[in-house]
Image: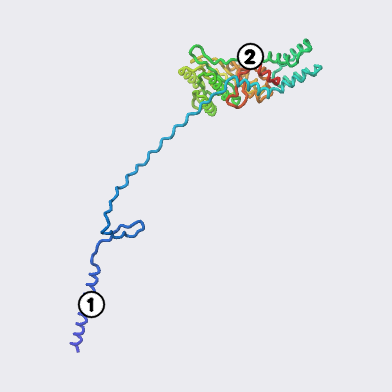
Amino acid sequence: MDALALVILVIAVVGVALVGAVAGLVVTRRRKPGPLPDTHTDVLGAPPADPDPDAPPVELSAPPATIEPEAPAEPAAPAAPEIERPEGTASRLVRLRQRLAGSQGTLGRGLLALLSRERLDEDTWEDIEDTLLTADIGVAPTQELVERLRTRLRVEGSADPRAVLREELLALVDPTMDRALQVSGEGDEPGVVLVVGVNGAGKTTTVGKIARILVAEDRSVVLGAADTFRAAAVEQLGTWGERVGVETVKGEEGADPASVAFRAVEEGRRAGVDTVIVDTAGRLQNKQGLMDELGKVKRVVEKQAPVTEVLLVLDATTGQNGMIQARVFSDAVDVTGIVLTKLDGSAKGGIVVAVQRELGVPVKLVGLGEGADDLAPFDAGAFVDALLGG
C-alpha cells in the first residue's frame, strides 16, 4: 500500500513538471522579439501605414527657410504744415467798412436823426451829447464836437446835417495821424515790434495776425514768444507761425521774458529777416512790476537792435476800463500805436477817439472778428463812413 502511494505521488510530480515545461515553451514563443514599433504618428495620432515596396521613392523637400522677424518700421515723419497765403490789405479794408457799418451804424443813425429835427433846441443837444458819451468818445471830445456842430449848423443854416457830421467826426478821429506800422529797421537791421497789453485782450492772437499781414506783403518775419508765464500763449504763437511759415523763438515756461526776446531779435538778425515781433507778458498785478518787466524787455532787446514800434492791444468792448489799461501801459513803456480788438462787436466805437486823445498816439490796427485775417489797418475815412451807415 505504501509502495503504491509512493508511485502515485511520483507520477503526479512528473506530470506537474511536464505541464510547467510546456507552458513555459508557449510563453517563450509568444515573447519572441519582433521589429520595433514605429513611434511616428500622423496628425490624427494613428501610426502610418507600411510603405508600399512598389511605390516610387519619395523625394524629401528641403527644410523650410528660417523666417527672420521684420525690423520695426520707422515712424513716418510728420507732414509739414500747409503754408497759408494770407489775405491782402485791400480786401481787409473792404471788410472793415462792411463790419463796422453793422456794429457802429447805430451811433451814426442816432446822431443823424437828432440833427435832422426841424428845431434843434437844448433838449436835442443834450440828447446828442448823451449819445456821444454813451459811445465812449469821452467828455472833452464830446463837448468839443457838440460845440462845433452847433456853431456850423447855426451859421450855415441849410447845410446838410449828414455832411457836416461826417466832416466833424473825421476831424475828431484825425486823419492826419501817421498810422503806418514801423516794421523796418535801419540798414540791414530788422524792425523790432513789441506787442503789449493785458491777458485776455487778444494780444497773442494779434501778434499772429500781424505776422500774416507782413507775410502777405512778402516780408520775412521771426516771432518771439516772450509771454513765458503762459504755456498756452507760447504754443498758440507757435501755431500762428507755422501757418504762415515763420519761425517762432520760444523759451521754457517761466523763463525770463527778456532773454527770450533777446534771442528772438538775435535770430532775426542772424537770418536777415525784415521784422521781429515779440509777444510780451500781460500780467497787470501792479503798475511798478509791469513797468520794471516791460522796461527790462525793451532795454535787453535794444542791445541787439532798436525797437521800432510798441503796439498796445486794447479790447474795444471794455470801454473806460480799457482807458485805465492804456494809461498804465503808456507809463510803463513808450507806446507808439494802438490795436483795438473786437471793434466789430462793440457799439462803442468812440473809444477810437478817446484812446487817441488820452495817449496822443494813433489807432493803427483794428480787429474785426475771430478769423485769421480779421485784422485790418485802421482807416479814418472808412471808420467814419461806417459810423454813418455807409
Residue 270 % position (x, y): 45, 18
User: CA gap, disc 1 to disc 2?
Assistant: 141 Å
Disc 1 crowd, CA 10 A, few/some/many (<14, 14-19, 20+): few
Mark 1 = which residue? 19
Labelled disc at residue 192:
none
Residue at (44%, 32%) from the top-left corner? 77
Residue 315 % position (x, y): 63, 23
Query: Which amino acid, mark 1?
Result: Val
Question: Residue 41 falls in which quadrant of the image?
Answer: bottom left
Toward the viewer: 146 or 76?
76
Q: Secondary structure at mark 1?
A: helix
Decide if residue 248 is in sight here.
no
Q: Is residue 146 left or right of residue 14?
A: right
Toward the viewer: 52 or 261?
52
Toward the viewer: 289 or 310?
310
Of the two numbered discs 1 and 2 on the same chain, state the one appearing first in sequence.
Answer: 1
Query: Which amino acid, mark 2?
Result: Gly
172, above or below 23, in the image:
above
Residue at (48%, 15%) from the top-left corner? 304
Question: Residue 92 falls in which quadrant of the image?
Answer: top right
Task: Check the picture and name the quadrant holding the C terminus.
Answer: top right
Single out the mark in the foreground, 1 or 2.
1
Report the colour scheme. rainbow
Q: Is residue 373 left or right of residue 384?
A: left
Residue sticking out furthest to the left: 3
Q: Secondary structure at mark 2?
A: loop
Residue 335 % position (x, y): 59, 16
Decide if residue 199 is in sight here.
yes
Labelled disc at residue 360:
2
Residue 290 % position (x, y): 57, 21
Disc 2 crowd, CA 10 A, few/some/many (<14, 14-19, 20+): few
